[in-house]
Amino acid sequence: MKKALFNVMELSGILFTMAAATVLRNLYTSLGGNTVGVLFGSVNSSVWERLKPIILCYILYGLLELMAARPYFRQFVAAKALGLYSAAGVFIVLSYILPEEFSAVTALSALASGFLLSRFLTLWDKSLSFFFTAACLMLLLMFIMYFSFSAFPPRLDIFLDRESSMYGIIPDYIDIGAVFLSN
């Protein structure tokens, strides 16, 4: 493993993934609501949809780290899975604590917690190989949630768009003002 490169990539990953997630956040509206925008962008302003670009960028940057720094595979996968869930958890908690005006702080804090935890666990002297299978299942579960919940969101608060009081993909023909007034 290239330890010096890995350290640099983990710490710089916070800023790179933050920038990429910011670009992806607006992809759905930029592409006019097509399928690529649904898969990789945010379809509304719910907590889940603001988290989706962070999840995607974190995973893609992890693949880049794996190819460039070549850390021990099982240790790295376990550490990245725990880091991803840590980042998601911190993002969700801070989204309910901080106002939406602080969404950049929320995203940056979530990414920092995920990358720092994965860095610590990857470089940890103790082996996480026993956790590899569970980590793969965790990543598979995140993959399924990522591609399912935009089109078929559960009726939970995390998926509710506060601006429109709707879940998932908001149709173009909906009058947001009328929906807001009816609630």
Image (tube, helix red, strand yellow):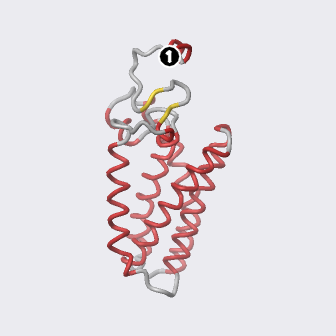
Image: 72 above or below 17: below
> Which residue type carries mark 1?
Val
Q: Is residue 67 left or right of residue 95?
A: left
Q: What residue appears at the point 46 percent right and 27 percent down from the top-left corner?
A: 166
Q: Residues within 10 Å of mark 1 (few under 14, many from 20)?
A: few
The residue where tag 1 is placed is 179
Q: Is residue 75 above or below residue 18?
A: below
Q: Residue at x 38, y 21 (%)?
A: 171
Horizontal and vertical percent for residue 150?
Answer: 38, 38
In the displayed structure, 79 sits above or below 91; it is below
Residue 152 coordinates in the image, percent (x, y): 33, 37
Mark 1 residue element = helix
Q: Nearer the viewer, residue 52 or 27?
A: 52
| Foreground pick, 114 / 65 | 114
Q: Quadrant of the C terminus?
A: top right
Q: Give the image quarter of residue 133.
A: bottom left
In the picture, the quarter occupied by the N terminus is bottom left
Residue 148: image quadrant is top left
The mark total stands at 1
Residue 146: where, in percent of width, then height?
37, 48
| Image location (x, y in percent) of residue 110 | 58, 56
In the rendered structure, the answer to whether residue 13 lies left or right of residue 30 reads: right
